């Protein structure tokens, strides 16, 4: 039986992880835009990987269900790399919550029903989830365990509570790691694992847009004042993804790996701390 790695979000980070974990397996590359999936598939296929493509809207249960069906038709789903999402500068708070928060919960639910024994999943969250002040235990539990289709109805996610795109993004990424922690219990019953990676500023086409956009000065300041003094690369995220998805990470599940060059450390305890 063919082993299948599903990559949702065909950008630089998804590709970097896929290159490290997909040798000898079939890669199903899915993206909202067909041209993105096709471009990534060309690069991977020319590098020797067996690849097919699909389109998916992670905010649609029907669309994610169709992707699951396509993946299981190819073989055993042994890996899922969920790297799809929208950033604060790309969308309204409601769209961010629907794609980044609800969409991730939907992917975890649907693929958690079919993941093969020994399989693993990595969800790309963000250091932004670590920037949000602590929530109450009740809020944490609600984000972690509320049935997927009831998530967006939570009082804490209503428009009067989430009024700007950055807050929507931060709470979505916090929800990703909480959701993964809860899903790790369910996935474990199938003999599978699931973790999040929370990257900082990683140099991708999107990050380059941010650095030259209206929020660019803030991004550059984070890079300049963090302990490592630089941005990260997709390959560095790929290395962590490979650890989490491979045999060396077999004891890691329900965890979140923050890899941001120390930006979060500087935000809470250093020169990036908000002025009181």
Image (cartoon, helix red, strand yellow):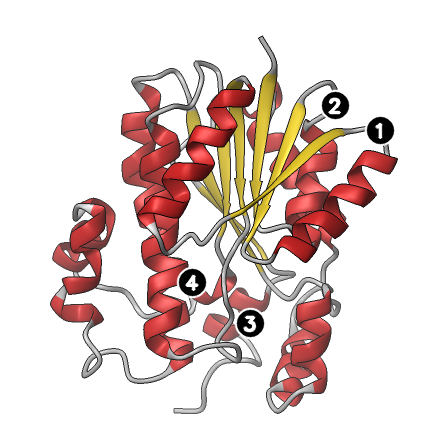
Residue tagged 4: 130
**Disc 4 crowd, CA 10 A, few/some/many (<14, 14-19, 20+):** many
Tag in front: 1 or 3: 1
Which numbered mark, 3 or 4, is in the foreground of this view? 4
Q: Dot 3: what SS?
A: helix
Residue 53 place in picture, x, y as percent: 63, 40
Q: Position of residue 21 (x, y in %)?
A: 68, 28
Q: Which residue occupies 58% across, 68% down?
A: 263
Disc 1 designates what residue? Answer: 48
Compared to residue 57, the image places residue 219 above or below, namely below
**At numbered mark 2, what does the secondary structure look like: helix, strand or loop?**
loop
Mark found first going from the N terminus, 1 or 3: 1
Question: Within 10 Å of the Cα at label 2, are there few (<14), some (14-19), or many (20+) other Cα atoms?
Answer: few
For disc 2, the marked residue is 23
Mark 3 Cα-neighbour bin, 10 Å: few <14, some 14–19, many ≥20? some
Inter-mark Cα distance, 4 to 1: 37 Å
Q: Which of marks 2 and 1 precedes in the sequence?
A: 2
């Amino acid at each position: 039986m063919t082993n299948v790695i599903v990559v949702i979000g065909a950008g630089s980070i998804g590709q970097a992880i896929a290159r490290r974990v997909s040798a000898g397996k079939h890669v199903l590359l899915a993206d909202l835009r067909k041209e993105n999936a096709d471009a990534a598939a060309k690069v991977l296929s020319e590098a020797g990987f067996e690849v097919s493509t699909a389109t998916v809207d992670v905010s649609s249960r029907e669309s994610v269900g169709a992707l699951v069906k396509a993946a299981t038709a190819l073989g055993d789903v042994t890996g899922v790399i969920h790297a799809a999402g929208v950033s604060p500068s790309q969308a309204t708070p409601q769209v961010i919550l629907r794609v980044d928060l609800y969409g991730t919960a939907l992917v975890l639910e649907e693929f958690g029903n079919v993941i093969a024994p020994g399989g693993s999943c990595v969800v790309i969250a963000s250091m932004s989830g670590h920037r949000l002040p602590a929530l109450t235990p009740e809020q944490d539990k609600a984000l972690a365990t509320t049935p997927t289709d009831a998530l967006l109805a939570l009082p804490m996610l209503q428009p009067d509570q989430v009024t700007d795109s950055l807050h929507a993004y931060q709470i979505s990424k916090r929800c990703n790691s909480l959701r993964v922690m809860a899903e790790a219990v369910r996935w474990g019953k199938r003999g599978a694992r699931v973790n999040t990676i929370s990257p900082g500023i990683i140099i991708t086409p999107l990050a380059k847009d941010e650095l030259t956009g209206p929020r660019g000065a803030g991004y550059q300041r984070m890079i300049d004042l963090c302990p490592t003094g630089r941005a990260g690369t997709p390959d560095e995220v790929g290395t962590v993804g490979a650890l989490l998805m491979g045999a060396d990470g077999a004891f890691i599940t329900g965890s979140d790996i923050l890899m941001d060059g120390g930006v979060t450390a500087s935000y809470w305890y250093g020169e990036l701390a908000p002025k009181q």
